Image (spheres, rainbow, N blue to C red):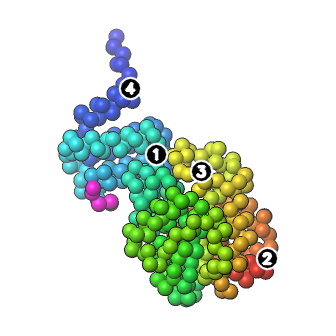
Amino acid sequence: MSTPQPEVTFSGLWDLAHKELGTVRDCLRFAVSRFNEAKLFFGHGSNNAHDEAAYLILHTLHLPPDTLELYLDATLTAPERDLVLAVLKRRVKERLPAAYLTHEAWLTGHRFYVDKRVIVPRSFIAELLQEQLAPWIADPASIRSVLDLCTGSGCLAILAALHFPDARVDAADISSDALDVAQRNIYDYHLQDRVRTVDSDMNSALKGRRYDLILSNPPYVTGGAMAALPEEYRHEPALALTSGEDGLDHVRVILGNAAQHLTDNGMLVVEIGHNREAVEAAFPALPFIWPETSAGEDMVFILRQADLRAGE
């Protein structure tokens, strides 16, 4: 009769890893096993355990992304192994999004500094900015002023400045902590001469200002969805996620104020998550345009200033 093996505790398993794992491949396999065992949620850059583990390992070792195959069989020094395992363990134990562990997030190939003062950048508007919002904007040079409302880390404001090089950009947010992060990213991109932060509760500090383009990826999580969010999302500022019971509190403010802040030919672009049906039901008179994104035609709407005026 075989003798039952003693159960290895969580701490004991990681202690063994520190002693026995030797290569990048070893650490990657161990990480994928632990991530899957812990049933981590992946929604902040990666969508599976393997890709997230590879990203965290490469970043910790100061190796370029997308070079995993080159280094799989490289032997780690003891200090390198300890650093890698410490990061992987925090991902499991604290369920922190990877971006908060590395203090970076990527959006359409652009790197942004992030920490727990802001949500991890993720926006389908970024995809549309890559094409300078064509075909809805025929002449990118005509965009001379842009507002990014609820800017958070400043990622959309910075992308707007990069894709519309003749524009000056206001990056507005109610959170002074978020604006500090946005300012850091603005300086990282050397855009402080064209992008400025504005401390504003929605439009409150923007009286008299008009823009050729207003962008917003506002809070839009419904009350029910907030209660069901995975633990990883609960590390993000609730202020940047929730927007009333139906998820439309911020959208209502945006639509109520946009016309007066747009130039005569100005355009409004807003991300609303999976709330298209609710938005169209709440504003049946508005002729929303729903551009195609990688997630379909339900995530972002476009409205022109004249359409907003007509719907008043």
**Of callouts 1 and 2, which one flags the residue occurring earlier in the amino acid sequence?**
1
Q: Residues within 10 Å of mark 4 (few under 14, many from 20)?
A: few
What residue is shown with label 2? 311
Q: Nearer the viewer, mark 3 or mark 1?
A: 3
What residue is shown with label 4? 9
Q: Residue furthest top?
A: 1
**Of callouts 4 and 3, which one flags the residue occurring earlier in the amino acid sequence?**
4
**Of callouts 3 and 2, which one flags the residue occurring earlier in the amino acid sequence?**
3
- Against 274, is 49 above or below? above
Regarding residue 271, the answer to whether it shows in the image is no
- Report whether 31 appears left or right of 281: left
Range covered by the magenta-colored residues? 62-66
- Against 278, is 8 above or below? above
What residue is shown with label 3? 238
In this view, the residue in front, 26 or 110, is: 110
- Against 18, is 142 above or below? below
